[in-house]
């Protein structure tokens, strides 16, 4: 398989990516097709759907991050997202694990990899449902604008399919072990003067990302440690004290 497109988002690194789509429903993404597939006719009728399925490659080619973080650094230094994605895809995949420690369980308990959506898999393939915002038709081909994408900037897209409610929605579905581990969100202390440094259209998504606690699951309580999140070309610095995340600088 080869990518048909790449998605461009406001998150150039693994750090901060929501652990599932729609945990940050205002995150913006643009799906730009490769020249071979950049045909407006190929998306005819897609704007009649509200949601789409995306089939993609985990972390631009590396299960669990690894070289993808290096690619993110390179992308930030001047390489395009697509170039970084291709570079990471050419690297040797990380070893997969039959059991993993999901963030939902605090990063302490192990379950089988096939009972999770962990990137540490035999094949680093991701599946995400996103909300279709709009379709932009250009002379260079279509651009699909989506919301709620839990993907890193430059992630290769293998396929786009419509979400069909009568076939894809199962109201009686069981959430397995996840239902016994409700997700915990942080309160976000974001001073208004720092919010003013963020473009208005980017602020809701940023707040949602921070609320999900970007830190590694099971992180030690270090209230004075300053973390840095790369988002929409900004460096967002924050600390976490208990259940409260404090934004301390936006540059």
Image: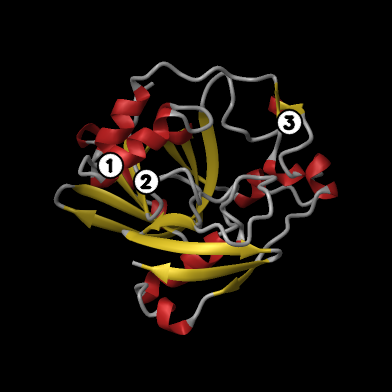
Residue under pointer 1: 75
Tell me the residue that label 2 is attached to: 153
Name the residue located 78 percent from the left edge and 45 percent from the top edge. 178
Q: Is residue 93 above or below residue 20?
A: above
Residue linked to disc 3: 115
Q: Please tell me whether mark 3 or mark 2 is closer to you in this view.
A: 2
N-terminal of the two: label 2 or label 1? 1
Q: Label 3: state its secondary structure.
A: helix
In percent of width and height, residue 162 lies at: 49, 46
Say if mark 2 contacts mark 1, CB within 8 Å: yes
Neighbourhood count class around disc 2 (C-alpha, 10 Å): few under 14, some 14–19, many 20 upward: many
Q: Nearer the viewer, residue 219 or 203?
A: 219
Q: Nearer the viewer, mark 3 or mark 1?
A: 1
**Farthest left residue?**
139
Snapshot quadrant of residue 168: top right
Q: Earlier in the sequence, mark 3 or mark 1?
A: 1
Q: Is residue 138 above or below residue 153?
A: below
In which quadrant will I find the N terminus? top left
x, y percent for residue 81:
29, 41
> Which one is in front in this view, the residue at disc 2 or the one at disc 1?
1
Helix, strand, or loop for circle 2?
loop
Label 1 SS: helix
**In the orientation shown, which residue stands out farthest toward the bottom?**
192
Find the distance from the CA under tag 2 to the CA under tag 1. Answer: 9 Å
On the question of residue 157 being in view, the answer is no
Quadrant in the picture for the C terminus: bottom left
Which of the pair 209/197 is nearer the observer? 197
In the image, what residue occupies the spot 63% across and 61% down?
A: 223
């Amino acid at each position: 398989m080869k990518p048909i497109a790449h998605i461009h988002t406001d998150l150039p690194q693994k750090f901060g990516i929501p652990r599932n789509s729609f945990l940050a429903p205002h995150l913006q993404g643009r799906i730009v097709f490769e020249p071979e597939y950049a045909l407006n006719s190929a998306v005819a009728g897609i704007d009649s759907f509200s949601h789409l399925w995306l089939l993609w490659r985990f972390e631009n080619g590396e299960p669990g991050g690894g070289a993808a973080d290096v690619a993110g650094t390179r992308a930030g230094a001047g390489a395009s997202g697509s170039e970084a994605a291709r570079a990471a895809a050419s690297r040797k995949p990380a070893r997969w694990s039959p059991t993993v420690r999901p963030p939902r369980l605090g990063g302490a308990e192990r379950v089988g990899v096939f009972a999770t959506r962990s990137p540490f898999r035999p094949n680093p393939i991701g599946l995400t449902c996103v909300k279709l915002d709009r379709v932009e038709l250009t002379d260079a081909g279509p651009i699909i604008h989506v919301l709620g994408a839990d993907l890193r900037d430059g992630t290769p897209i293998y396929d786009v399919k419509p979400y069909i409610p009568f076939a894809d929605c199962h109201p009686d579905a069981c959430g397995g072990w996840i239902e016994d581990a409700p997700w915990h969100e942080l309160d976000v202390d974001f001073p208004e003067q720092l919010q003013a440094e963020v473009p208005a259209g980017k602020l809701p998504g940023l707040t949602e990302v921070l609320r999900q606690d970007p830190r590694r699951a099971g992180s030690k309580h270090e209230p004075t440690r300053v973390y840095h999140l790369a988002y929409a070309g900004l460096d967002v610095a924050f600390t976490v004290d208990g259940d409260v995340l404090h934004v301390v600088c936006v540059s």
